[in-house]
Amino acid sequence: MKKLILLLMLLILITKVEANTVTGYVYVEVVNSPPEITSLSLADPYEDKDLLCNVDFKDEKSSITIFYKWYKNNQFMENKITNTLPKDSFTRDDVITCSVLPYDGYQYGQEKNVSVTILPVSLTTKAQTTVLNLISSRDISSKDLEGNSITGIAIANIKENPTPLFNYLIYILITLLLLLTIVNLKRHLNIKHLS
């Protein structure tokens, strides 16, 4: 009971002290951490494709500036300052390095780099390109209703020009007929051979 009375007296005393006005200043220092590169990679290092330097970062700000520098076989490449290095800037077996420096408007982060050796065009890619060119294909690029990019290869547009699709179907039909003829010929030869 004595404790309860003491607690009540203390609360009354605190209430009286709070009634007096006290003025003071609070200083707040906002600390900015430098931006940090969390992931760095070079996509599609083939001699027939542009080289893309992919960067992920961590910072208080959602958008920062990334400065790019490119090197070919350890030699600095002037005027190459974007995240894409055009395919005419390198050849097979060149060692390409992408160096990035992040900046958030207040501080620079640590510079990082990644290197790859340029690979020859794969035979599959060349074969696909040849077949697609034969059937009148073309690269397409568009945007969906939300504004996202859509890219791909259109083999033929029947509304614009039905001829390439028709030619492709004829090609498939002829190939199938040849295969059937070969199979029938083999059966015929096997039957005569048995008699």
Image (tube, rainbow, N blue to C red):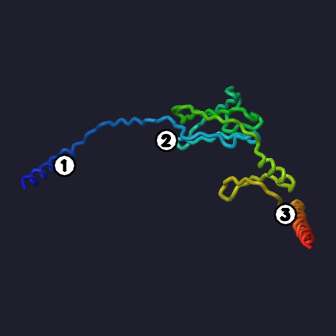
Q: Where is residue 169 in the image (x, y as percent from the top left)?
A: 87, 64
Residue 169 vertical placement versus 108 (above, below)? below
Residue at position x 77%, y 54% in the image: 153
Residue 156, how many percent across, how many down?
83, 59
**Marks 2 and 1 close (CB-CB < 8 Å):** no
Q: Give the CA distance from mark 2 to mark 1.
A: 41 Å
- Label 1 crowd bin: few (<14), some (14–19), many (20+), radius 10 Å: few
Q: Name the residue under label 3.
A: 158
**Mark 2 or 1 closer to N-term?**
1
Q: Which amino acid does label 2 sit on?
A: Glu
Residue type at mark 1: give it.
Thr
| Amino acid tagged 3 | Ile
Q: Would you call the spot at circle 3 few (<14 residues within 10 Å), some (14-19), or many (20 or more)? A: few
Extreme-left residue of the structure: 2
Whichever of callouts 1 and 3 sits on the residue coming sooner in the sequence is: 1
Q: Position of residue 163 (x, y in %)?
A: 90, 61
Q: Label 1 to label 3, Cα distance in Å?
A: 85 Å
Q: Which quadrant would residue 54 be assigned to in this image?
A: top right
User: Residue drawn 77% across and 49% down?
Assistant: 124
**Depicted 183 relative to depicted 143: above or below:** below
Residue that mark 1 sits on: 15
Q: In this view, does 177 lie to the left or right of 81?
A: right
Question: Is 134 or 29 nearer to us in this picture?
Answer: 134
| Mark sitting earlier along the chain (3/2) | 2
Give the labeled residue for mark 2.
60
